[in-house]
Amino acid sequence: RHLHVLSQTDSTNSALLKLAQAGAEHGTVVCADHQTAGRGRRGRSWFSRPGDGLCFSLLLRGRRLLSDDVHWPAWVPLASGTAVALGIADTVAITPQLKWPNDLLLGGRKLGGILSESLLTTQSPPFFIVGIGLNVNLPQKDLPEDLHDTATSLIMATGRPVDRARLLSNILERLEEQLEPVLDGEIAQAISAYTGLCATIGRQVSIEFAAAPPLIGLAEAVAPDGALLVQSLSSSSGPRKAETVAV
Ligand code: BTN
């Protein structure tokens, strides 16, 4: 496997995208000790400090063309969440939960997140850049003010510093195990593994819409296309798919 370890970059997702466009192979990894412009989902930024976090991106090249009836691409980020949770459990013997779609939680606080970016065309198999950011050796006192009540780290949860190289290697092993079937279009195992780790299922959720008031509902399951199925509690219209969910 090609592993690029950088002391600093803007964003490992952006650095890997450039390598992907220049023909980098499936399985290429870019890891950085420090990101100057780490990106999160939904236009947010991703905070990390040099030496304290694990920030890396993995290039996956699909082996099938997209088709309407097969939903495997939606499972690339979801199964990545499963893999990261299992890789953490292999390292520190605590299993994080997943908040749909793929936030990693410990004790209800955010331990890490995943930003998956893909190029989906019908002419050639898609490729994916799965970017993973975890708070590892960041002590409570060094959390930024705005993350004080919502974020956590592995050292906060276990009381011990964690070897980031070992953590990375365990997570990469689990990513391979969980994603190879998905890239071949087989998602049954990914659905059951994800469902077992997902803390959102069975919870009351508030679904946010761009131009309408939020809807309150009960999250029931994750559908084969990766959508969260929510039974509305505000009307009796039956399960519906949520675009975004804030618990
Ligand atoms: C989120 O929860 O919003 C996703 C956070 C993803 C952060 C990681 S850190 C490595 C990779 N490079 C980035 O710029 N973002 C992802």
Image (cartoon, grey):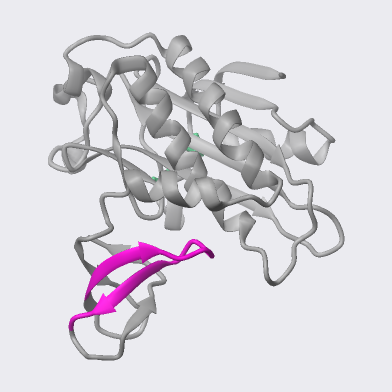
From the viewer's perspective, is 76 left or right of 241?
Answer: right
From the viewer's perspective, is 90 left or right of 141?
Answer: right
Q: Residue at x 38, y 72 (%)?
A: 242
Work out which quarter of the rendered image holds the N terminus and state it.
top right
Region of the chain picked out in magenta, as a range: 217-233
Residue 93: where, in percent of width, then height? 28, 19
228 in magenta:
yes
Residue 172: where, in percent of width, then height? 55, 24
Q: Residue at x 70, y 72 (%)?
A: 68
Residue 70: where, in percent of width, then height? 67, 64
Work out which quarter of the rendered image holds the C terminus and state it.
bottom left
Residue 143 found in image quarter? top left
Vertical relation: 208 (above or below) 8 = below
Vertical relation: 180 (above or below) 139 = below
170 in magenta:
no
From the viewer's perspective, is 14 left or right of 137?
Answer: right
From the viewer's perspective, is 206 left or right of 184?
Answer: left
- In this view of the protein, which residue sits in the foreground, 113 or 65? 65
Q: Residue at x 18, y 86 (%)?
A: 234
Vertical relation: 244 (above or below) 212 = above
Residue at the bottom extreme of this rendering: 236
Residue 180: where, in percent of width, then height? 65, 37
Vertical relation: 54 (above or below) 59 = above
- In this view of the protein, which residue sits in the foreground, 183 or 127? 183
Q: Magenta residues: mostly which secondary structure? A: strand
